[in-house]
Image: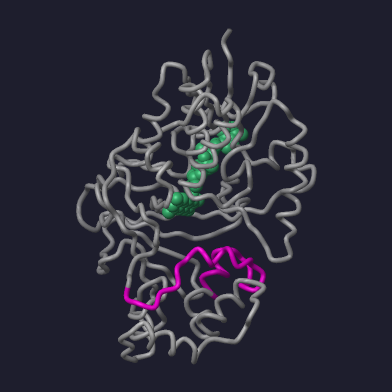
Amino acid sequence: MIDRILVVGAGFAGATVARSLVERLPGCEVTVIDTRDHLAGNAYDAVSEHTGHLYHRYGPHIFHTNSQEVVDWLSRFTEWLPYQHRVRALLPSGQTAPMPINRDTLNSHFGVSLDTGQAVSDFLDSLRLDIPSPRNAEEHLQSIYGPELTELFYGRYTRKMWALELAELPISVVARLPVRRDDNPYYFNDSFQMMPRNGYTALISRMLDHPQIAVHLETPFDKAMESDYRHVFNSMPIDEYFEEIYGPLPYRSIRFEHRYGEAWEQDVPSINFTDDGPWTRKTCWALFPGCGGKPGGHVTYEMPCSYEDNNFERYYPVKTVDGWPQERYRQYAELAKQKDNMTFIGRCGQYIYYDMHQAVANSLMIARRFRGNAAGPDV
Ligand SMILES: Cc1cc2nc3c(=O)[nH]c(=O)nc-3n(C[C@H](O)[C@H](O)[C@H](O)COP(=O)(O)OP(=O)(O)OC[C@H]3O[C@@H](n4cnc5c(N)ncnc54)[C@H](O)[C@@H]3O)c2cc1C
């Protein structure tokens, strides 16, 4: 008998569940639907008709992970190009400095000559506030960098990004960035850092290329579909599914502005803006490996906004120190537990700030649990 499964969302979460199930669940046929007219969810990339560059429509997506399992799984669908991401922050002086803050950042901003890790530690000791148990992102940062650097590198940026004060945000929002005492200029520490050779859309397309997977784009989920399937794996926003009966979950969104022919003098692909202007970041696609196109040429600016002001594009789940969004999500998660025929997956289904590798790892786990571990590992 055919086991019919519906997957809502053709992003990393949905594609991973779909592929894992058809390979390991005998008789399983999966239908994947997505509202959008393309695969790969927010990781979608495409060749620019203006410049020939491969660019990411929803902002730069950098692959990084410590999970060998995730790398092995994804490597079945793509080759990789080595890539370690670098970012610089544009300061009020007009200079740029490495972000996350490192020894070079401190030397150039304060005009000092710190030459060892110990010298950096001693210098930061002279700046930092003594806060033994930080309660929020501001206290966490001030306990490492002190108030001046916290405001300069994180304060205004965060207010733009989240429309919240640092003191309102949990530590986890800023603790993703490493604290450096050397001159390591890279953004991440993970043991695997690379980009898919032909891009994310090609990767997801290969994942979904299977005779037992049917993909329907421009097809929004409708509750009437549920009765046609044994189970639904759903990456739509969980509050939207339950018609916001507990109120909407807060999300932050971003508007992207593409500029063509703009000069780029930096040797890093992303610049963070630390000022009060509307932009948080700009990215030059030509500096990513395998991006093709002409040098310079295509620069994308990011302006955070509410999702209501951006066609209901929900990008970042918002978590606060007082925990009200988390509590509202828990109410929806309780409702979801009562639905035996549905599992919520991915960033919006689980209301978690997943990176791509985390969405994959979680979806592999969910698929494995559903089909029974007896069917064996995915890789
Ligand atoms: C600006 C930005 C930058 C990012 N940078 C990075 C990065 O550098 N590195 C990294 O690892 N991760 C990054 N991420 C996170 C990455 O995008 C996510 O981890 C990944 O997209 C999660 O995949 P997903 O499948 O959960 O969600 P999504 O990619 O959002 O896919 C969900 C899909 O479901 C579809 N959908 C929603 N509702 C419905 C419905 N009702 N009916 C049908 N379809 C529906 C949507 O159209 C969407 O295509 C970034 C995210 C953003 C927004």
- In the image, taking residue 137 as reference, residue 267 lies left or right, namely left
At a point 65% along the width and 33% down the height, the residue shown is 343
Q: Is residue 170 magenta?
A: yes
Tell me, what colour scheme is on the image?
one colour
The residue furthest top is 1
Image quadrant holding the C terminus, namely: top left
Task: Please determine whether, in this image, residue 192 is positioned above or below residue 12.
Answer: below
- How far from the left and from the top, in percent, is residue 58? 45, 48
Q: Is residue 338 visible?
A: yes
Q: Position of residue 182 (x, y in %)?
A: 34, 77
Q: Is residue 311 visible?
A: no
Q: Name the foreground residue: 81 vs 45.
A: 81
Give the image quarter of residue 87. Answer: bottom left
Provide the residue span drawn in magenta.
155-183
Q: Is residue 14 above or below residue 256?
A: above
287 sits to left or right of 328: left
At 53% from the left and 27% from the top, the residue drawn is 33
Which residue is depicted at the point 36% across and 59% down? 283
Q: Indicate whether 15 appears above or below 25.
A: below
Q: Nearer the viewer, residue 228 or 360?
A: 360
